[in-house]
Image (cartoon, grey):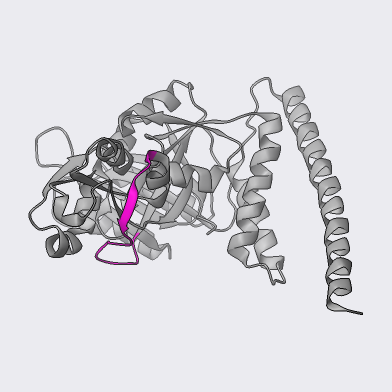
Amino acid sequence: MSSDQRINSLRDRIDAIDDELLRLLNERADVSTEVGDVKREKDPHPQFYRPDREAFILRRLGAKNPGPLPNEDLLRVMREIISACLSLEQRLLIAYLGPEGTFTHAATLKHFGSAVEPVAMASIAEIFREVEAKACHYGVVPLENSLEGSVNQTLDCLSGSSLSICGEIALAVHHQLLTNAKNLNNVKRIYAHEQALAQCCTWLDRNLKGAERIALGSNAAAAQRAQTETDAAAIASQQAAERYGLGVRATNIADHPQNTTRFVILGHCLPQATGEDVTSVMFGTPNQPGALHAILSILADAGISMSRIESRPKRSGSWDYLFFVDLLGHRDDDAVAPALAEIKKRAALFKVLGSCPRAVF
């Protein structure tokens, strides 16, 4: 058999496989629609998006994947399939920190797929308000960056919100220098979110030392501003460059390449345990020696690992602090539930912010 004949034969096999994929995808869509109908019969206001069920599907397929398709590519495809099928039950409105082209926008599409309707918000507080009012089904907000630490606006909003954390997303962050200036010598101003400016300060000191650095609400807003100026640049993503028609003059300019931001999904749902979960809690301690140690000892004695702890001053002006802790496990787990109950007894203030599946990627 000649090379051309072999290629034609292989292409025939691909066509046959594609036909079978088409049939199976529509069969899956039919079953998803039927699931939606059953949910409506049971509950007039059903929960269509199930973070725990989605995580189970992705982890199960990732564990069974024999290759050669890498798990990351497989799970990306499956998220899009899940997104498209879920949209037949309900098209989700997802509030995110806009405008288009922010890393929050990218995290939203990474987690929910492209068959949702992202709704850009001007601030983190506005995202909370929209989801609390049920004008949007879910919201996506940045919680912490691997280099710059926690996003204080998110922590402050979580402390007073009725919403729960029902999912998390880990997104690798790559900063690009975007500009319409003909060369870097013409750049007089650099727009970016304050965290992006901090994350790229070494590169900026070396290459654009004399340029004014101006902090804006988001990197996408920075790209929007730089779009109309010939002597300005923005630090933003490749997607922002494409969205706002800017040239990429330097790539991956962050001081540390391993830069990851963790985003959380806000909603009214309470995901069930999956076996790979994280629980976020907030508490305040009495102002006395050893109070924080006593509470953290409850987790240690129960064999519960913490993955994060942050403190924020209470807004009472009395130098009291709130502590935000992430622990491994679900709030309903046999070891976690009694430990949280004991912390609630001892803490001056206590709130479970949510339990959700750990990020699959």
Residue 271 in percent (x, y) is at 56, 42
- The answer, for residue 318, to whether it is visible in the render is yes
- The answer, for residue 341, to whether it is visible in the render is no
Is residue 129 inside the magenta stretch? no
- Nearest the viewer among 225 and 113 is 225
- Nearest the viewer among 97 and 154 is 97
Magenta-tinted stretch: 244-259
Give the position of the N terminus as an image quadrant. bottom right
Residue 130 in percent (x, y) is at 41, 24
Identify which residue is drawn at 67% across, 44% down. Answer: 82
Residue 192 in percent (x, y) is at 23, 45
Per the picture, the main secondary structure of the magenta-coloured stretch is loop
Q: Quadrant of residue 74?
A: bottom right
- Name the residue furthest right: 1
Identify which residue is drawn at 89% across, 72% down. Answer: 5
In the image, taking residue 271 as reference, residue 119 lies left or right, namely left
- Nearest the viewer among 233 and 112 is 233
In the image, taking residue 279 as reference, residue 147 lies left or right, namely left
Q: Quadrant of residue 260?
A: bottom left
Identify which residue is drawn at 54% across, 55% down. Answer: 334
